[in-house]
Amino acid sequence: MRKILILTTLALIGLSSFGQKIIENPDFSATTANYVKITKIELQDTVTKIDFEVKYFPKWWIKISSDKTYIQNSKGGEKLFVKSAKGIILNKKHNTPESGINLYTLYFPAIEKNIDKIDYIEESWKIFDISLTEKEEISFIPKEIQGNWLKTDGSNEWQYGIFEDKVIYQNKIWNNILLNSKGKNFELSLKDGSQQEKIYIKLKKENLLIGDSPDNQQLYSKTKTFNTDYVIENDLEYELPVFKIDTAVYRGFIDGYHPKMGNTGMAYVNDIIIHEQNSCLITIEPDGSFYCKVPMIHPQEIYVRMLNMSESVYLEPGKTTFQYIDLSEYTSAYKNYNHRNKRERKSLFMGDVSLVNSDLLAMDTIYYFNYNIAQKKILDMTGNDFKTYCLDIMNQELNALDQYVQNNPVSKKALQIKNMQIPYRAYENILSFNRMKSSAYRKKHKVPREQREIPLQSETFEPSYYDFINADDLNNPISLISGGAYNSLINRIRFSESVLPKPNYFYVALMDTISSKGITLSIDEEKILNNLIGCENITCIKETLESDTATLNSFRQKYSELFSSISKDAYHQIQSVNMSKYFGLTECFATEIMFAQSKCESMRGRQKPFEEGDKVEIREKISDDFIMNYLINYSDNKEKEIEKKLAENKTKTGYVINETPKTEADKLFDAIIEKYKGKVVFVDFWATWCGPCRSGMEKIKPLKEELKDKNIEFVYITNQSSPIDTWNMMIPDIKGEHYRVEQDEWNHFASKFNISGIPHYVLVDKDGSVVKDKVYFASSNEELKKLFEKYLTQ
């Protein structure tokens, strides 16, 4: 009996001794912070001790928040929050010492004894599947042949990725693998459905001989090979025609991925004709593979956001690009932009556009314009100073590109793209002078974001200022291969201060018409019209209109037909004249692109497809058949979308169309708000044609849903510039209270709240008092939520 008791006691001691278990440098499957290392885990009956080594920059701080830092069974379950620490104080900023190494210990509650893997979760650092058992070196594929293997002929082409349980070959991932080995020779049989391939491998020191048969093998290395004699085969530039409607396949593999990091990404591609950025969902599988199809109309870089990665990838319509992504490149700490820019690039590419992508990636450090540095200097610069500054940087980049090409093999396509991107980006920066200087002034003087006007005069330029622009380059459709660089430059030209008609353009056109018809104005009529022509900004026009409403109303009634004859074409005619005067662009490819963009923006604003008159105008003004047909097809598709949307709107709820209260215009706002007394009211002054208005509405949707049970009302007010049919079609997607007011009523609102542009937001408290007559729409809904809650709790 005593013997049994002793054995039982020893068994219990054995179970409790779990508390003494120590795991040095535990294995883990994935991390979001490559610079955070767990050096030791000690499991005790009452506590779990974890030792950390965090390599960071001297004097940079880290902080461990007790309410956001925990460990958890990797399979799920209770979150065990940190209780105490040694070497760091919880909830306080800890400055990294000069050594750049932070050493500390965190103490958590004891974990259950049957748990073999845990996750460590902190506010921004996450480490998944940390092993609490002994390391097991089990690998289906031998370590000697694992890795990414590059050709050694000087091309450095990536053709094989061999990992523990998968092989990347011919633009795809093979998970069904059969391995045969004999000494230094290996045979990999790959299968995917009916498709089968074989790879023959032979060890050769640190390199491999690889091929599709034992008699047809080439030498491959994990590191790049430099060969001055290497010549790229079939090396051709992009040629016309550049337009092609098709989808590009973008797929790849993320090394270091864990499903808990998220399972989607987004690819964004610019459509320069309709001036929209289309988004495509990227689906990430549990094994780290991803895939998406991207509709395109010409070769260009797309922008990819996935996990911690934000990069550009070059795609071509109808072709496949496979990218290997090493997540450690994006989970490392970088001190600043330059430090990040000089990091080791670990992406590899297969497929039809692999060489272009590899070359562009290798040359991406040839970009010397630093926005932050430019912002610090620009306040002391004139426009000519800044122009010289940007062109100097451009020449440095072009010289660096020439130097790189002399020492490295570069495909003609990649060089062609880069030789366009460098100047186009420099030109875009020059055209952004006034905007950038305004931003720098606001930053230096801490001007509130809601303050629209600042005491800084925009500089105007003569046509000679833009002598760096070569119209022939912009009119060559091949420029489209530079992607966002050309797109952004065209946008800057289209909306440059020199091209945009001044706010008084309508009254200038009106005076020209009056003069051409030989009409004689009264002294008062001529005075107010000349005053309006002399206005340089919207504020001046608004004040002039309000200074003598009697004369103006009489003038409008007397010449109503004249007023209506000054159509929107006057705006475009002035824009066209300026485009030729300042940039030498007259009825050419670039202006056709801009015209197409303008027509599509108008269509989206009206939410109506092109009418027959629009189509006639498109056929008259656009000579490029692809652009013309693309616009017509876009309109036809938009018509189908609108029909579908109208049918769907019949079942939508959550929006209310209100009759505007009948009262004096200066009392109208109070009359509207009276209905919502006892609630916080967020008022949005908007229009159907206003892109930023619609964008703001989309952005706030999640916050509105979050606050749907709170005592807050969202009120939307527009005027007659929003076509009634368009308004009726759009508002079912905008939950809230809606009003469409007369122009005079809108003018009173504009005067009351100093509305110089839309969207314009006003906040009203529960008592009906305006507490903010100009709410800045925060970049984050969190900031707006805090503002709402301040008045919701009162």
Image (tube, rainbow, N blue to C red):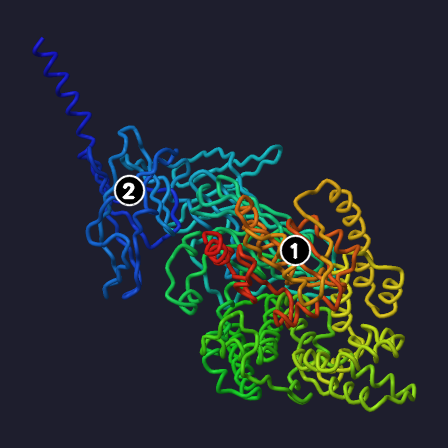
Residue in the foreground of this view, choosing between 783 and 611: 783
Asked whether residue 234 appears in the rendered view, the answer is: no
Q: Which mark is residue 164?
A: none
Q: Residues within 10 Å of mark 2 (few under 14, many from 20)?
A: some
Judged left or right of residue 374, residue 746 is right
Q: Secondary structure at mark 1?
A: strand
Q: Amino acid at mark 2?
A: Pro
- Nearest-to-viewer mark from 1 and 2: 1
Q: Residues within 10 Å of mark 1 (few under 14, many from 20)?
A: few
Q: Amino acid at mark 1?
A: Asn
Where does residue 92 sit, x and y in percent of width and height? 27, 57
Residue sitting at the far right:
517
Q: Residue at x 40, y 54 (%)?
A: 331
Which quadrant of the figure contains the N terminus?
A: top left
Q: Earlier in the sequence, mark 1 or mark 2?
A: 2
Q: Secondary structure at mark 2?
A: loop
* Residue matched to label 2: 26
Please, is residue 424 above or below residue 516 in the view? above
Q: Which mark is residue 278?
A: 1
Residue sitting at the far left:
2
